Image: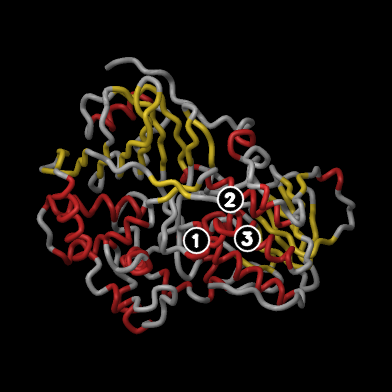
Amino acid sequence: MPTASAPRRLPRRTVLKAGGLTALAVPAATAPAFASSLVSPRDEAPDTVYDVIVIGAGYAGVTAARELRAKGLRPLILEARDRIGGRTFTSTFLDQQIEIGAQWIGPTQPLINAELKRYGIGTLSGTPPTRLIMPSGGGFKEFPPDEVDARYGDLMNRLFEGAQDLFPRPTDPLYRKDLVAAADGLSLRDRLDRLRLSADDESWLSGTTAGYSGGSSATGAYTALAQWWSLAGYNVAGYEAVMSQRLAGGMTGLLQAMLNDAGATLRLNSPVVSVADDGGKVKVTVRSGQVYQARAVVVAVPVNVWKSITFRPELPNVHQTATTQGVGVPYSGKLWMQVSGLSDRVAARGAEGSPFTTLLSQANVTGGQLMVGFNSLPVLDGADTGAVQDAVRKFLPDVRVLEVLAHDWGKDPYSQGGWALRRPGQLIAQLPAIQQPQGRVSFASGDIATGWVGFVEGAIESGLRAAQQVLKMTKGARSLTVS
């Protein structure tokens, strides 16, 4: 096997410069009314009581902070990492801007598109691939694009047949609760089995169902993916368009613009270990032992992380069950690779159990091509360039992997999983109870959205809802609008 350079790990201390707090410029028109400030706990008066503490500087938390500041409240944001963004993470690799986390948006996501319009930020569309590689006969082979479009589209239509009956109003997933309740216990594996597909046809779908489920089609709920399909317009063109656009300036660029408007005090490197609500105010303790106080708190970390925080009083049963089961998918690796031996733009789909569920050409770079791969198997170590090359060669036998930058969101202590995809039974069991505050503690995360669960769109929706709840707790001004 040819030698290759060692994989690159994400440089913790250079993340801020590459895609974090201060580096990404925003248009002049977005100059903030209230500048957020990054300060040290040493600057804190010991008896300071904030209006609201937001735990987590991802899209849900920053949205909540911005909306509350607009109503006159003083927010403090506590972020565990040394950067903002949560499961969004703009960085650079091979002199290219890349996304380590969430990467795409689509035209059927009104909230994030409204944010782009507000801040004057455009979108970028990728160049379509010229070669499509799909599962076949236990391996992989190239198929004509027209054949892939027709066959895959037909299979997806079969997979989601009846989705419009389940979700006639996809932003209100319990509108037909009678039908949803009967289907919510089904896993995506159950749905595939009911279709009685040929082995090859199933392999074309199982990479999608297993990939989105974080490794196994048995983990993801059929209703979860069917709601995505419905939100996208009940057709494969709309479904694929959801992942067709990237943000000029990156995901962190938009988030920074929103943070500028939040006028918040921001503390990085401040992982929260406990939240104690005495009925009058809430005390939040971070790992260093520093204690902060506020009239209300927004917990804007992933559901999977709730179990790492001690809540007093304890979380309601629905919240405890959700964080124990997990909502963010368990295995979610994203690998950016410099490869040689490839001149065409390629898109490859894996089957369930394949080392990659998706491989995509992204850009031509010096010495080859930049590719991104999505892995939902714990056995593939993104730090092992040789293993990554072996995995890529199952799809592209002549390709050499030169360099790798990888991040495993499942092993990240501050996410403990990737994007959210509800498990069987969770939609009926969780909504709307999991969205409700407990005392003076509200919850915000794309994991508990009503609509686009697992997307930045859902995080914004959830942040708006949490802001509404805090305004009621603190007797704030008029309500905010959640679309």
First in sequence: mark 1 vs mark 2 = 2
The residue that disc 3 covers is 63
How many numbered dots are placed on residues in this image?
3
Measuring from the top left, give residue 161's x and y in whole percent. 22, 70
Of residues 5 and 313, the one nearer the viewer is 5
Measuring from the top left, give residue 251's x and y in whole percent. 53, 47
Q: Secondary structure at mark 3?
A: helix
The residue that disc 2 covers is 254
Other-residue count near label 1 (Cα within 10 Å), few / some / many at <14 / 14–19 / ≥20: many
Quarter of the figure that contains the N terminus: top left
Measuring from the top left, give residue 474's x and y in whole percent. 76, 74
The colour scheme applied to this rendered structure is secondary structure
Cα–Cα gap, marks 3 and 1: 11 Å
First in sequence: mark 2 vs mark 3 = 3
Of residues 187 and 258, the one nearer the viewer is 258
The disc labelled 3 sits on which kind of residue? Thr
Rendered residue at 74%/57% (across/down): 284
Can you tell which of label 1 and label 2 is closer to the viewer? 2
Q: Is residue 382 visible?
A: yes
The residue that disc 1 covers is 457
